Image (cartoon, rainbow, N blue to C red):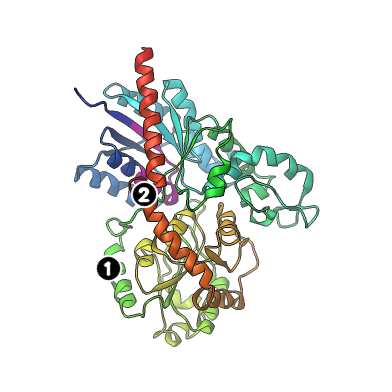
Amino acid sequence: MAMDKYEVVFISTPLIGNLVPTVEFAHHLTRHDPRFSATILIITVHERTIVNLYTQSLATAASDSQSHVNFIHLPTVQPPTPDQYQSSLGYTSLFIDKHKPHVKHAISTLTSTTSVAALFVDMFTTSMIDVAQDLGIPCYLFFASPASFLGFMLHLPALATQLAADFVDSHSGLIAPRDSAIELIVPTFSKPLPPSVLPSSVLKRNKDGYFWYLEHARGYTETMGIVVNTFLELEPHAIASLSISGLPPVYSVGPILDHAGASQWHPDGAQLHDSIMEWLDQQPPSSVVFICFGSMGSFEGPQLREIAIGLERSGHRFLWSIREPPKGKLDLPGEYTNVEAVLPAGFLDRTAGLGLVCGWVQQVRVLNHQAIGGFVSHCGWNSILESVWHGVPIATWPVYAEQQMNAFELVKELGLGVEIRLDYREGSDLVVAEELERGLRRLMDGEDEVKAKVREMKSKSRMALMENGSSCKSLASLIEEISGRIQGLKKDC
């Protein structure tokens, strides 16, 4: 008897932090159950060179391997005009929405040759839920951020009333509480949230980013299920609080990581990686602090100089990834042509035996090196999962998106990190050298309880993916749900 085959389709926001976990989950699903194959629909943004290099490498890798994941590059569309949006999220949401006809055509073409079992959208491609409904295909959400933030998004419509009543516009452009004692209750957090850790798009209620947060959150409840890149042992309270009537079922399947990193597709991959690894090989175990702010994190000269002073004063060995701020609104950070010019005079010479300054770096491979003892991070969820997987404690320095809430959860709820700042964002006061130095000393010299918890969570993260592990069981439940739904549709026919 022939084995049933199921095709699942993914559509991801065209950012590295969204696209990479989507691709890795598609591979994870198809490896786990040979009945499944996957097609990922690629949205192209010409200005984002690194994202495009990654997507081009995916098609090459798929053609050269026995992978059950295929890729379709959607036709390009005209971007929204500046009068149509006020924020980067507004731009991204409108830009994705313009791809609806192409997504519908691509899926319709697939259905002519195979049975499409599901469409997976991500946190900002929810407009494609309409396409799934038009085609009669079950739609699921793949959520690449933590379960705690998923709960915040689902609770945001209810919070909107409190935000309108208890908050006022401030001179900074962010809404501020009328009463400094105000805290927010979100079910997926065990402790009240200070308003200062909410995403900037929520705190800028006079911009369209707030509208789009609400719009996407409403879409989540229209899906058949929500797949989250987390695991039960890491976020037990958040996951338990999502198991309530009226919400789609939640499947925690993580940690889903790209263990290979970017060595195969980044233009500076192999050569730069080799020189960094050679330097790390010469350092004592757990002696180096790694400073990196993700694919979209960058700072201007004044903040870089404060970091440099703090590093030098701390006396710790360091590996510091410095990126130049993007030149255009749609560009990603780039590389400084002369990094010495933006650092304090003589800094590179004085720290030559102590640290290494570099540009882009393969973060996941660096975290895997035995010399790394701590990680100053922007607290993107992918970075947190990578640090947990490799057992490296974090000092929190959030920058954008939901990272302030991630930092709060990491430090205040999970006890897996130390605080430099929890509420830093674009426009904040500089993190001065003394703050960084204090955080580095706690990260590298103290906080033994945090280090012990991180080591314990490292073990639990690996066990979650093993047979009978929590994430393995959750993935099996998702597969059963998808295949059962398709079998039910066949019987109805």
The quarter of the rendered structure image containing the N terminus is: top left
Q: Is residue 73 left or right of residue 397?
A: left
- Residue at the spot of label 2: 465
Residue found at x 59% / y 57%: 413
Q: In this orientation, does residue 295 appear?
A: no
Q: Residue 111: which quarter of the image? A: top left
Q: Are marks 1 and 2 in contact (CB under 8 Å)?
A: no
The answer to whether one can see residue 192 in this image is yes
The three-letter amino acid code for the residue at tag 2 is: Leu
Residue nearest the viewer, comparing 119 with 128 = 119
Q: Give the residue furthest to the top.
A: 493
| Segment colored magenta | 8-25
Decide: is 380 above or below 107. below
Residue at point 47%, 33% (across, down): 225
**Tag count in the figure?**
2
SS under mark 1: helix
Mark 1 or mark 2, earlier in chain: 1
Could you say where residue 443 lies in the image, as x and y percent from the top left?
A: 52, 73
Residue indicated by mark 1: 271
Task: Name the spot of residue 438 as percent of width and height, x first.
Answer: 58, 77
Classed neighbour count for the residue bearing mark 2: other residues with Cα under 10 Å, few (<14), some (14–19), many (≥20): many
Q: Nearer the viewer, residue 417 or 365?
A: 417
* Amino acid type of the residue that numbered disc 1 sits on in the rendered structure: Gln
Q: Is residue 208 above or below residue 200?
A: above
